[in-house]
Image (spheres, helix red, strand yellow):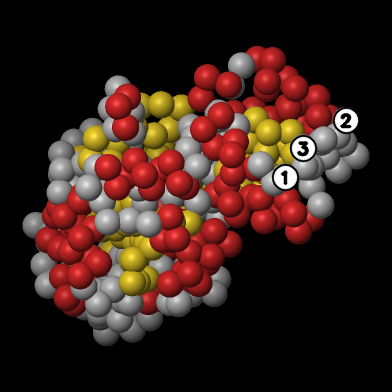
Amino acid sequence: MAPWGKRLAGVRGVLLDISGVLYDSGAGGGTAIAGSVEAVARLKRSRLKVRFCTNESQKSRAELVGQLQRLGFDISEQEVTAPAPAACQILKERGLRPYLLIHDGVRSEFDQIDTSNPNCVVIADAGESFSYQNMNNAFQVLMELEKPVLISLGKGRYYKETSGLMLDVGPYMKALEYACGIKAEVVGKPSPEFFKSALQAIGVEAHQAVMIGDDIVGDVGGAQRCGMRALQVRTGKFRAAQHVLQGTCSGPGAHTCSSPKTLPEARSPGAGRGITQEGQSPPVVLAAPCSGNWALLWTAPCESSSRDSTADRRRPRACSCGAVVSLGCLDSAPALTFTAGTTWASPQVRSGAQAVLGHLFPVPSSRTPFQTTVHSPGPSF
C-alpha cells in the first residue's frame, strides 16, 4: 500500500462532507462518528486547506455549525459550503420567487427572498413537511408556469440518522420531475458548480483537492467528474451490499476506509487482491465489493502496449461469491446486471442502455477505461 503522503502528492485542499462523515444527526443533536473530531483537528493542523461541503437542508448553516461545535468540532460558519445560501443567490440573480417546499429549520435562510406569486419551486429535505398537500401545491405551481423551474437542494436518495436510514430530497424531487415532465436544477452535490464554489472558497484547483464523503454518487462520483480525487468512508449511509465504486489504482481515484479516524491509513481498494498498486500500470476498474473484496474487476485498456500486454481486457475476473453486480441505468432501472461467478457473457441486459464505470485521472476528454453499449442479448467489448 502506498504511503499516505504519496496518496496526497500535489493535494492542497480537502473537502469534507458532514452528515455520515463527521456525525450522524438525530435526537439530542446527533452523535459524532468515532475519530471524526480528532481527524478534523489533525487536518487543520496540517498544511492542507479544509472546507466543509454539505447538502444539509434541514438546518441553517448557523444551527448546523453550532451543533457541530457542541460535539467538539473546530468549525466556523464561514468554512461551510451549503446549498441553501447558494440557492438564495441564484433566486436573487434570476428574479425568481419560490414556493418553498423546505424544512422549517432552514426557512430562515430564505428570509430575504420574495415568495409572493411564486414562479418557481425550491425543494429540500422537508422531512415531515413532505405531505401530500404540500407536494401537490408544488406540483400545481409548476404546472401553471409556462416555463416551470424546479430547484432542488441536493438530490440524495437517503442519509443516516442515529435512528436509522431516512429518505432524502431525491425521491421527492424525482416525483415532481416525473409528474411535471421537467428536469430539476440541482444546487448542491453532485452539481459541478457546487463543488467549484467550495474549491474557489479555499483557492485550490480541482486536481489539487480530495473530497471525503459517504455517498458514492453525490460525494465520490460528483467530485471525480469535477477532476478531484475522492475517498469514501465506510460510515453514514455506506452499505457494502449496494456499493459500486469507480476508481483507478494507477493514480488518484476513489478509495474507501472504515471511518474518519483511519483516513491516514486508507486502504487501496486492491490491497491483498493481486491488483496493480498505485504508481504502476495499467489502471484497474473495480465494482461491487463483497466481504471486503471485489465482486468484479478488470484491467482498462492501456496506451502503451508494452505494459501488461498479456492482460485479458475482454473478460473481467469475477469473485465466485454470487454477488449481484449492476452497472449503469436506463429509465431508473439497471442497464446491465450479472451474478458474480457466473458466465460474464450472459448477463441480464436492457437493450440500448449504456453502462459506464470508472475513469483515469485526470479524466480524458471523451474516454473512460470501460464503456459498453448494451444490445440484447449481451454486451460487446
The residue tagged with tag 1: helix, strand or loop?
loop
Q: Which mark is residue 195?
A: none
- Residue sitting at the far right: 146
Q: Name the mark nearer the viewer: 3 or 2.
A: 3
Q: Residue 113 carries which label?
A: 1
Using the numbered discs, state the Cα–Cα distance from disc 1 to disc 3 in whole angstroms.
Answer: 6 Å
Q: Is residue 33 left or right of residue 104?
A: left
Rendered image quadrant of residue 159: top left
Q: Horizontal and vertical percent for residue 323?
A: 26, 35
Residue located beneath label 3 in the image: 115
Front residue of 213/217: it is 213
- The reply to whether residue 64 is in sight is yes
Disc 2 marks a residue whose amino acid type is: Glu
Disc 1 marks a residue whose amino acid type is: Ile
Using the numbered discs, state the Cα–Cα distance from disc 2 to disc 1 in whole angstroms.
Answer: 21 Å
The residue tagged with tag 3: helix, strand or loop?
loop
Local crowd at mark 1 within 10 Å, few (<14), some, or many (≥20)? some
Q: Residue 144 carries which label?
A: 2
Residue at x-position 60% and y-position 54%: 86
Q: Name the mark nearer the viewer: 2 or 1.
A: 1
Disc 3 marks a residue whose amino acid type is: Thr
Q: Horizontal and vertical percent for residue 300?
A: 34, 66
Question: Eyeballing the image, is 293 above or below 77?
Answer: above
